[in-house]
Amino acid sequence: MVLEFWFEFGSSYSYPAAARIERLSAQRSVEVRWRPFLLGPIFQAQGWNDSPFNLYPAKGAYMWRDLERICDELGIPLTRPSVFPRNGLLAARVACRYQDQPWVCAFVGAIYRANFADDQEISESEVVRRCLSNLPVDPDTAISESTTPDSKARLRRQTESAKALGIFGAPTFAVSDELFWGNDRLEAALDWAENHVV
């Protein structure tokens, strides 16, 4: 049983999803495949030049309060970023280049904590390097390999794949042809993986 986890580093609700997906999927014996992508091109295709949480202030205010409740319940720290959404392009390239490595979960978690717990500028290579520093990979090599033309094209293709699947926001969980959007739909996606996939 396989679940694809489509996420964006600037996405607020992807933060708690990333914090809990490994534990919950392991309990169900569901394999997680990490699929970073970029929301910018998808939002632009919908006519947005910014996050809907910025474009619609009431929606944004609700989201931040909702995220506070979710993070409090999960026991994970939250500091509202001084910049939202942050540019996670470099981190996404690294995650995409190494998405099948066993340590990618730890890297993704470190980037999300840097953004949503520590209010760090995740677009900076030094922040990405620190997030890689305790993992079984050389940070400088990982960053160098993730910024080659091939790696850049890989992330573009993955974003196009997200569009082709019909993904319009993050986090999205894909189980075969079924899409589940939002942190609160993770359990439903896992249920589907258990009960509907042979």
Image (tube, helix red, strand yellow):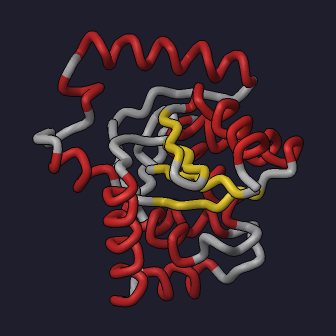
x and y percent of residue 118 in the render? 56, 39
Q: Position of residue 80 (x, y in %)?
A: 46, 27
Nearer to the camera, 25 or 40: 25
Which residue occupies 41% across, 68% down? Answer: 158
Front one among 73 and 113: 73
Numbered marks: total? 0
Residue 115 versus residue 126: which sits nearer the camera? 115
Q: Residue at x 48, y 35 (%)?
A: 181
Can residue 90 be seen in the rendering of this structure? Answer: yes
Percent from the top left, x then y, of residue 48? 15, 39
172 with respect to 191 (left or right): left
The quarter of the image holding the N terminus is bottom right
User: Relative to residue 46, is residue 4 depicted above or below?
Assistant: below
Q: Position of residue 81 (x, y in %)?
A: 42, 33
Q: Tell me where residue 184 sits by quadrant.
A: top right
Residue drawn at 33 percent across, 43 percent down: 168
Q: Residue furthest left?
A: 47
55 or 87, which is in the foreground? 55
Q: Is residue 136 left or right of residue 54?
A: right
**Is residue 42 positioned above or below 48 on the image?**
below
Figure quadrant of the C terminus = bottom right
Residue at horizontal 16 percent and vertical 48 percent from the top: 44
Task: Answer yes or no: is residue 20 visible.
Answer: no
Q: Is residue 20 left or right of residue 150?
A: right
7 relative to 98, above or below: above
